[in-house]
Amino acid sequence: MCPDTRQLEGLSKQLDWDERKIQRWFRVRRNQDRPSMQKKFCESMWRFTFYLGIFIYGIRHLWVSPWMWDTRQCWYNYPFQPLSPGQFNHYAAELAFYWALMFSQFIDIKRKDFIMMLVHHLATIFLITFSYANNMLRVGTLVMCVHDASDIFLEAAKLANYAKYQRLCDGLFVVFSISFFFTRLVIYPFWVVYSVLVESWEIVGPYQAWWLLNGLLLVLQTLHVIWFYLIARIAIKAIFKGKVAKDDRSDIESSSDEEIYSSSSKNPSQTLKPKDSSHTGNLNGETHDH
């Protein structure tokens, strides 16, 4: 959908159009493929509702669980730990949601962080499945709650952006940045990953799944560091320039589209989430996940 100079010359001769007219046609065609603002608002509202609902559901069960306050409790009497209905429902909802996010990547506009998000979704799905199969439900619910917490503010910021409440959008994005830092760069590595790396080895002893489980957790942590770098750049612009700007994770298909996008930025388009989280892209588009 973005012809190079050689293709432009060929099309110009075949159609007897000048090259600028052909470029304009392709630009209009690309814009037609982009989801409408209403569709992106509905998608973000759905993700916001899910993250908020599943976080409240998860924290409600974890709040009265001893392993939330003492992570060593995750490994006492392992693997003979009972499965509660709350844990099963939490796992089923999260697994279904991340499968949906992964498949939606292939039918959505291809973004620059497509590979990074694909790795994130695959690692997350494998971790959820693996921890369930190995009855590591206690630490698994901790990991999921830690990840869902910051995504709530990400989707809320995107909703504010779509509704054209720029100050609210900027404020929510700064809150998202702070919550992302504390949940994924402080609590996750120094509380959850430490428990799997060190406490499980001390209490349960060496087990075959230790290497694979920790490898996947560290893959997620690596992605968190990369995403936070991108998030921090946007947050700094929001604080000092008063507006959340588009970052490196855009809904543009190629670098040659950037000039086109900037010229039509009066009608912005997706994502902030690396995480995503969500993943993190820009507020003008979609994501996931992160």
Image (cartoon, helix red, strand yellow):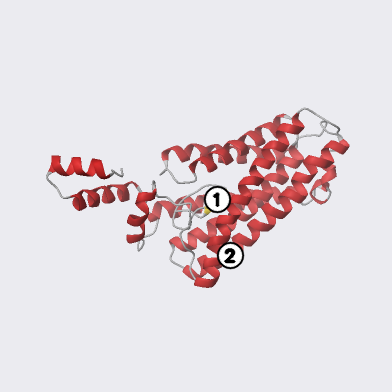
Amino acid found under the numbered disc labelled 1: Pro
Q: Are marks 1 and 2 in contact (CB under 8 Å)?
A: no
Q: Is residue 233 above or below residue 16?
A: below
* Quadrant showing the N terminus: top left
Write the residue at 75% across / 41% down. 139
Could you tell me residue 137's position as x and y percent? 74, 37
Foreground residue among 284 and 247: 247
Q: Quadrant of residue 195?
A: top right
Q: Can I make out residue 135 in this image?
A: no
Amino acid found under the numbered disc labelled 2: Val
Which numbered tag is attached to residue 274? 1
Name the residue at the top extreme.
208
User: Is 239 positioned to the left or the right of 245 in the image?
Assistant: right
Foreground residue among 244 and 254: 254
Q: Is residue 151 above or below residue 213?
A: below
Could you tell me residue 43's position as x and y percent? 47, 50
